[in-house]
Amino acid sequence: MFSPLSVRTALFVPVLSLLLSNCAIPLASSIQEALQQGGYIIYFRHVSTEVDYADQVTAVMGDCSTQRVLSEADWQQAKMIGAAFRALEIPYDTVISSEYCRAWQTADLAFDMYTKNSALNFFPAEEYTSAQVTQMKDAVMPLLVQVPHAGMNTIIVGHGDVFESATGVYPEPQGVAYILKPDGINFTIVGSVLPDQWLMY
């Protein structure tokens, strides 16, 4: 991780932001209704891996044996998150993941669809320079400000460092989702949802 960067985080919908906060409460009907209307970017950090370490230094894209792998329990968690989206009738038509196995596998298990995008990949270093942080931010920002298709949400499955480069917020724990409201130029962080909150519908 690295020092936080500034980002516009004014609340877009105060009530929604409150309900989406990291509290151990079920998703409320108002959250379901808001997301059902579409217009949000839902950025997931991939679900948990068996071991947490900086594999981006040596990882080879397309070779899962060189990367951190999902734990068996979290394969099930990803599937349950997808089931919750279907039960809550949250619409989406675009799912984008990084090229890392744990990201596209999370997307595949949860949503049964994904498109890999290298803009969501780490910079291949364990400690980042300011220039490298800026490079990650510049790569991912177009995805975070893109307004979804009418009546739809866009789901992104990526990594903590990449999200932090653009927002100044490090997403913890693994599997957490941040809800963003994009306007085509910038975005507002509305709130976040812990993995288990999707499962408490």
Image: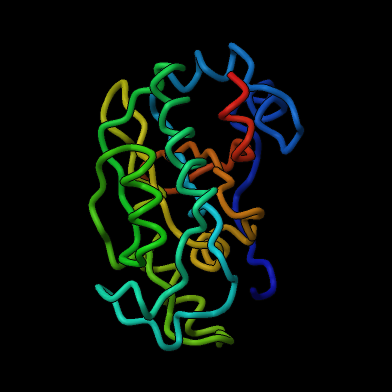
State how many labels appear.
0
Quadrant of residue 196 within the rendered picture: top right
Q: Is residue 4 left or right of residue 44?
A: right
Which residue occupies 51% across, 77% down? 133
Q: Position of residue 170 (x, y in %)?
A: 64, 60
Q: How is the image coloured?
A: rainbow
* Depth check, front residue: 192 or 174: 174
- Say which quarter of the image contains residue 193: top right
Residue 136 position within the rendered picture, expressed as x and y whole percent measured from the top left? 43, 72
12 in relation to 15, above or below: below
Relative to 161, residue 114 above or below: above
Q: Nearer the viewer, residue 138 or 55?
A: 55
Q: Residue 86, position in %: x, y?
A: 39, 21
Q: Residue at x 75, y 31 (%)?
A: 24
Residue visible at 58% across and 18% down? 201
Q: Is residue 146 left or right of residue 17?
A: left
Left-right relation of 196 to 106: right
**In which quarter of the view is residue 21 placed?**
top right
* The N terminus: image quadrant: bottom right
Above or below, comparing residue 80 to residue 128 in the picture: above
| Residue drawn 57% across the image and 28% down it | 199
Q: Going by the picture, which residue comes out furthest to the front? A: 72
Residue occupying the far right of the picture: 23
Q: Position of residue 162 (x, y in %)?
A: 49, 66
